[in-house]
Image (cartoon, coloured by chain):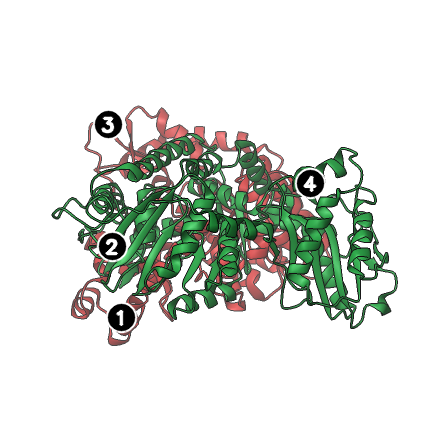
Chain colours: A green, B red
């Protein structure tokens, strides 16, 4: 027997196209006719259901169960700011029964919420697709064992999680469609006992899913670039990143679209997968992207509509998914449950301000083969005036980095490394911006009373990291680019590395690798600002 | 037919079975019983034994491969996904040359392809010879490949060192088309697909294998592959042969099957067995592939025309009697008349005959006598 789970992924209407699921359809068609095939999903509209049945063929019989979940208690909470969400959660999450999941819209927000909870001593863990497989498995296991009150995650967490007693699922960001929402909340209360389902909504939230829809696809020129490269030679994903200087996320979208349109395919060359051009392939048809964009906008509108409906919330979701059966439902804040309202609370507002002032983004750089440890940034680039100040100094002849950056960076250092002892600090030798980082490091050294070393040098010219769009090219750019004048002084030492902006982390990691090779005991990065993003975001 | 791919993979590689025996089953279920391969595999063992005259061992073998069909579905999906094609014997895409040259005794049940399948329908030549061929043989190979490419003929070769490699490289250099016939399963040719990527993308190279897609190179496969090379080609040129090995036995086999095989006339003192092959009945040719006979200076086209005028009436009569009560394709007429004309000469001639009518069936022209109902012969071979 062949079982196809999460079968809604097969449908072009149910999901963004995924070549792997399209292959399942091809496989089913090749199976001997006597072999049973079952396709299951918990989230299919009528349209998706029909699409799956049509594609699988074989006279498949459709059995539709009821989607109603009577144990759900659904709430929508309207807020005016991001702070109001944080305050309500801070105040109330410990009063909710059992453990649950909080879904945020972005990776950065999983980190911010998780640190907010740390600040309040609420046991939580954060999860996103950027974590390595080991950490992901550990968090999934921890969730099953109720190790925390909640796991804060992007929508990367979920498929395949089978925990019967998830007691609450809270969204701080409106999902892209009622299908996504039903899929995500469907993980709660599988044991049949009550589960709280809460959606926060700030009218500004709409812009995030909208930007995914609008900006979800790279410009056509980038598609052409990829096709041209593959037309010339078979290329793996990493080769393609090097040839085109495109981000991995973009390459994956382009790859899936080009496979879908029959322009390229993935074939094995020996043991490595490479993309190859299909002889006589059609031209790219961008019209399909527009159709998909419209369909997604309609779905987002249906999701936004959910916020303000006055009838039964679960009925609205079930109707959307094509389950028109059943009586009236009284399990939401429109049908009997008390609405959740936000009241202003000066004491909590103060707590949150205090948190913001002491919040410093973490630099995740640890790996098994390096003695580098996770570091800290004083702020996100682009948040408050930190980014502007750095830009002015670096590119507009604005002079030294201003003092408030120094104060902020010192605070970050004390928070993260207050108890660490360092033997000396080094700074990353700059490509273009003169002595800014050196002068900044000198000031840091004086205040912290950590000796400074000027011996970390570039042994070859590198390009500015920001001209490279992906981690492969960034790593290539700095590989073996550094040299320490007195390598014998590194052995057994604890070293602080100072830089201005942390993006992919390729430079810092390379220096960490180099110092590890020279025998350093510990290497810790400290930077002024961390960019939002980097490579490979799930959202 | 694509949906039956897993069944075809299963029947094609029955362990220890000869092609002849496999093809007997195919002819029976496809042409006689008309139940298709799926229908055949769904018969119970008693029906197999009775209707197909299978012994106990054969029945067991078939039961074994039947249990492998679901696994072969996964294999087939993976192959299709990577751009490979699986062409069974009964497909209109199967090489007509293979069928008519190898008959049901030696035609493989399945061809695995990657590249421009259309190349299989073109006129083709094979250039064969030793892995250690000398300079003069390589020069001969280059000359033949050059002429072939000029005349839009496809060069078939076996991807071995020496003559094979030269034939392929020359065909590519002269912008001709090539078929690489592999001595291994088609999925084990990774480096080759990388080397000839541009030619495959441009439609100038077709890679073909008749073995299980995952089986690595083996000596016995290389020998079996030679038969396929001879089978695919309309003309066979031998650059250099020793008195044993693949080329030698392949050419002897070809002569026995009454195929015309052109062998390079060796210079005095060359150490090879070309002259022995010529003595056995192969046609000697010079370094440029021209027949070494008294009248070789006559331009080939003039020669052909002369023949046509001389015996035109006789040939018309022959065709008339051949097409009594049935219709045949040009290939079938050519084969049954045993004429030395090329297919295109014959086709042009047929079109000029006023008692002949043409009808297209499945993309192929069939000829019959005007006013008689066109009955095609169901023919696998």
Discs 2, 1: same chain = no
Position of A261 with respect to A527 (left or right) is left
Instruction: Report whether residue A406 is seen.
Output: yes
Label 4 to label 1: alpha-carbon separation: 62 Å
Please state, as top left, top right, bottom left or bottom right, where the N terminus of chain A lies in the image: bottom left
Image quarter for residue B76? bottom left
Residue occupied by mark 4: A467
Chain holding disc 3 = B
Residue A406: image x %, image y %? 73, 49
Q: Residue furthest bottom?
A: B56
Position of A163 with respect to A230 (left or right) is left
Residue occupied by mark 3: B370
Q: Nearer the viewer, mark 4 or mark 2?
A: 2
Residue occupied by mark 1: B63
Dots 4, 2 in contact, CB < 8 A: no
Chain holding disc 2 = A
Alpha-carbon neighbours of circle 1 within 10 Å: few (<14), some, or many (≥20)? some
Q: Residue furthest left?
A: A327
Q: Is residue A516 above or below residue A26?
A: below
| Numbered disc total | 4
Q: Foreground: B63 or A484?
A: A484
Residue A462: image x %, image y %? 78, 47
Residue occupied by mark 2: A72
Label 3 to label 4: alpha-carbon separation: 75 Å
Q: Residue at x 41, y 36 (%)?
A: A206
For residue A236, the mark is none
Label 1 to label 3: alpha-carbon separation: 50 Å
Discs 4, 1: same chain = no
Instruction: Report whether residue B267 is seen.
Output: no
Discs 2, 3: same chain = no
């Amino acid at each position: 027997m062949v079982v196809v789970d999460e079968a809604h992924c097969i449908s072009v209407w149910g999901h963004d196209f995924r070549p792997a699921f399209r292959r399942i359809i091809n496989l089913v068609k090749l199976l001997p006719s006597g072999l049973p095939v079952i396709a299951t999903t918990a989230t299919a509209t009528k349209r998706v259901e029909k699409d799956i049945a049509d594609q699988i063929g074989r006279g498949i019989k459709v059995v539709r169960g009821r989607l109603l979940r009577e144990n759900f208690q659904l709430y929508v909470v309207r807020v005016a700011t991001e702070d109001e969400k944080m305050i309500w959660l801070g105040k109330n999450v410990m009063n909710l029964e059992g453990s649950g999941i909080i879904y945020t819209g972005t990776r950065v927000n999983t980190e911010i919420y998780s640190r907010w909870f740390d600040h309040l001593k609420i046991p939580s863990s954060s999860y996103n697709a950027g974590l390595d497989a080991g950490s992901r498995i550990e968090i999934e296991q921890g969730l099953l064992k109720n190790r925390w009150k909640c796991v804060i995650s992007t929508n990367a967490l979920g498929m395949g999680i089978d925990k019967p007693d998830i007691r609450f699922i809270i969204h701080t960001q409106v999902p892209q469609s009622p299908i996504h929402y039903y899929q995500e909340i469907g993980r709660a209360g599988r044991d049949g006992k009550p589960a709280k389902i809460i959606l926060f909504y700030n009218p500004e939230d709409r812009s995030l899913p909208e930007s995914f829809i609008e900006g979800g696809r790279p410009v056509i020129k980038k598609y052409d670039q990829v096709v041209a490269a593959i037309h010339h030679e078979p290329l793996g994903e990493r080769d393609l990143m090097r040839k085109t200087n495109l981000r991995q996320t973009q390459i994956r979208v382009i790859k899936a679209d080009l496979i879908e349109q029959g322009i390229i395919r993935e074939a094995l060359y020996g043991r490595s997968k490479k993309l190859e051009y299909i002889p006589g392939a059609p031209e790219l048809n961008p019209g399909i992207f527009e159709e998909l964009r419209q369909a997604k906008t309609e779905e987002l509108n249906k999701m936004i509509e959910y916020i303000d409906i006055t009838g039964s919330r679960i009925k609205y979701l079930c109707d959307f998914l094509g389950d028109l059966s059943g009586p009236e439902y009284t399990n939401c804040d429109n049908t009997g449950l008390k609405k959740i309202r936000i009241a202003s609370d000066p004491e909590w507002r103060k707590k949150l301000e205090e948190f913001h002032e002491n919040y410093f983004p973490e630099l995740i750089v640890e790996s098994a083969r390096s003695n580098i440890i996770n570091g800290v940034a004083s702020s996100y680039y682009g948040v408050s005036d930190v980014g502007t100040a750095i830009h002015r100094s670096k590119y507009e002849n604005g002079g030294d980095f201003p003092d408030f950056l120094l104060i902020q960076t010192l605070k970050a250092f004390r928070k993260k490394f207050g108890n660490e002892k360092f033997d000396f600090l080094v700074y990353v030798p700059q490509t273009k911006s003169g002595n800014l980082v050196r002068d900044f490091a000198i000031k840091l050294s004086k205040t912290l009373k950590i000796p400074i070393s000027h011996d970390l040098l570039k042994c070859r010219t590198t390009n500015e990291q920001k001209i490279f769009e992906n981690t492969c090219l960034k790593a290539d750019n700095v590989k073996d680019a550094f040299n320490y004048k007195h390598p014998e002084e590194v052995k057994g030492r604890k070293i602080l590395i100072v830089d201005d902006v942390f993006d992919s982390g390729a430079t810092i990691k390379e220096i960490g690798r180099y110092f590890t090779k020279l025998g350093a005991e510990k290497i810790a990065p400290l930077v002024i600002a961390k960019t939002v993003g980097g490579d490979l975001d799930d959202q | 037919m694509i949906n039956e791919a897993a069944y075809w993979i299963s029947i094609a590689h029955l362990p220890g079975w000869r092609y002849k025996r496999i093809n007997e089953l195919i002819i029976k279920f496809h042409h006689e019983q008309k139940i298709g391969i799926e229908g055949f595999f769904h018969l119970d063992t008693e029906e197999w034994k009775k209707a197909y005259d299978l012994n106990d061992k054969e029945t067991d073998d078939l039961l074994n491969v039947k249990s492998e069909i679901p696994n072969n579905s996964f294999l087939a999906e993976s192959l299709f996904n990577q751009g490979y094609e699986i062409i069974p014997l009964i497909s209109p895409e199967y090489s007509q040359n293979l069928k008519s040259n190898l008959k049901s005794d030696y035609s493989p049940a399945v061809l695995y392809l990657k590249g421009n399948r259309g190349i299989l329908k073109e006129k083709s030549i094979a250039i064969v010879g030793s892995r250690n061929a000398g300079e003069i043989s390589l020069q001969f190979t280059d000359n033949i490949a050059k002429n072939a490419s000029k005349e839009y003929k496809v060069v078939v070769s076996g991807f071995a060192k020496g003559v094979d490699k030269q034939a392929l490289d020359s065909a590519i250099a002269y912008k001709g088309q090539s078929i690489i016939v592999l001595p291994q399963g088609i999925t084990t040719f990774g480096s080759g697909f990388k080397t000839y990527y541009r030619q495959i993308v441009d439609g100038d190279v077709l890679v073909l294998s008749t073995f299980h897609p995952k089986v690595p190179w083996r000596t016995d496969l290389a020998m079996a592959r030679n038969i396929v090379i001879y089978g695919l080609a309309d003309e066979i040129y031998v650059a250099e042969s020793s008195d044993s090995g693949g080329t030698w036995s392949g050419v002897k086999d070809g002569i026995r099957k009454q195929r015309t095989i052109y062998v390079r006339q060796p210079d005095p003192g060359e150490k090879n067995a070309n002259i022995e092959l010529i003595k056995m009945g192969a046609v000697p040719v010079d370094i440029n592939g021209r027949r070494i006979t008294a009248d070789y200076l006559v331009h080939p086209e003039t020669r052909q025309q002369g023949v046509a005028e001389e015996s035109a009436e006789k040939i018309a009569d022959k065709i008339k009697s051949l097409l009594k009560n049935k219709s045949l394709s040009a290939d079938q007429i050519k084969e049954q008349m045993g004429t030395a004309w090329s297919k295109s000469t014959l086709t042009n001639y047929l079109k000029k005959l006023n008692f002949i009518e043409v009808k297209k069936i499945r993309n192929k022209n069939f000829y019959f006598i005007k006013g008689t109902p066109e009955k095609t012969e169901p023919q696998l071979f």
